Amino acid sequence: MRITFVKKIKLDGSFCKKCNEVQQKMDDAGQMEMIDEVLIADERDPSSPGMELASLYNVEQAPFFLVERDGEAPVIYTVYFKFVKEVLNQKTQEADELKEILNDNPDLDFL
Amino acid sequence: MAENLASTNQVSTVDLDQKLSSQTPQEVLTYALNEFDNIAISFSGAEDVVLIDMAYKIAPEKVQVFSLDTGRLHAETYRYIEKVRNHYNIDIDVVYPESEAVNKLVREKGLFSFYQDDHKECCSIRKIGPLRRKLLTVDAWITGQRRDQSPGTRAAIPVIQDDKAFARPGDSLTKFNPLANLSSQEVWDYIRSNDVPYNELHDQGFISIGCEPCTRPTGPGQHEREGRWWWEEATLKECGLHDVNIKK
């Protein structure tokens, strides 16, 4: 299994807030050891590796994780806690996961 | 065909979106209902009733509807859900939040914590949790989300999308937004011209209808979003990747 972690740099040159928060959580939990590669999606540079990957898989949110397993189609995770639970097989709090989903998809609160 | 689409990758979903975006909501619904057997319409008790009306006219035997009962809806909305159930003679799967999660929230923060914090904690427990439970049981779902409901967010709502957030582990979930390109006016034109039953709250000035404590009528010229969570400062979504910067 190969895991790629994609972080975003915004137009003003700073990392997106959630990218920093996820990076911090991963550092604290020792999860960065599981990451094979970190790519940057630089909004100022469409040809940056992370932007290319986002384009390839039509990912519209950052950060995201690309999980590649032998003989299987690559899987994209845009929800950090879902990634932690399903790929890293670590326990998560449902409340955290649900809040992250809503934060990333504010239109859902119209349902 | 359902299996083929269910296993399709994101790229082909994007191709499909380009194709379906130029089609009418009825054509999109026809496509969705033909492609998926296990597909459900999310009904909020508002003007998204047009989805039920359209689907009922296309394939009444395939209409599967669910509603999220947060426990805080207006009495009018409960009456309306029942009215729709009877009008179309359909089952509506009313989905509820986990009582333990609601108990914990209320015990720790009271019944109106969203006025002090923001609505997201409450919404995630009362709405997103049950929504996820429901979506784990289907292969595709249909929403009444429209682009004109949320002009503040950068991401355009596609007609069809690969729903990564709610997909079962190792599986895919397809989300259809047949009304994405419709305006509020066009939705209401449909409701009136087809005599579709609507929530009586609309006659009281409500445009967008959600939970009772978090919804209010709006005045002339106000956007419907101003009728929801009005005490919160509008913020722009930050984590979207600018479409213009992604090479197609």
Image: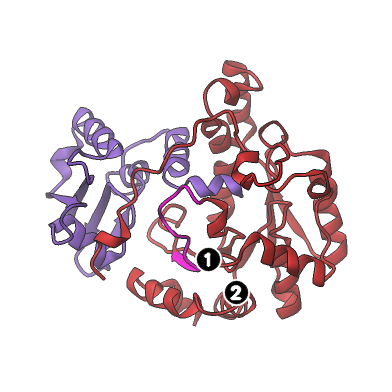
Q: Name the residue under label 1.
A: B139
Q: Are marks 1 and 2 on the same chain?
A: yes
Vertical placement of residue B70 versus B174, above or below: above
Residue B64 visible to an observer of this rendering: no
Chain B drawing hue: red
Q: In which quarter of the image is residue B168?
A: bottom left
Coloring scheme of the render? Answer: by chain
Residue B37: numbered disc: 2
Q: Which chain is purple?
A: A
From the top left corner, tell me how far across and down residue B90 is, in percent.
80, 65
> Magenta: predominant secondary structure element?
loop
For label 1, the SS is loop
From the top left corner, tell me how far across and down residue A17 is, in percent.
29, 35
The type of residue carrying mark 2 is Asp
The type of residue carrying mark 1 is Asp
Which of the two discs, 1 and 2, labels the residue nearer the N terminus?
2
- Residue bounds of the magenta highlight: B151-161
Q: In which quarter of the image is the C terminus of chain B?
A: bottom left
Q: Are marks 1 and 2 in contact (CB under 8 Å)?
A: yes
Within 10 Å of the Cα at label 2, are there few (<14), some (14-19), or many (20+) other Cα atoms? some
Vertical placement of residue B112 versus A48, above or below: above
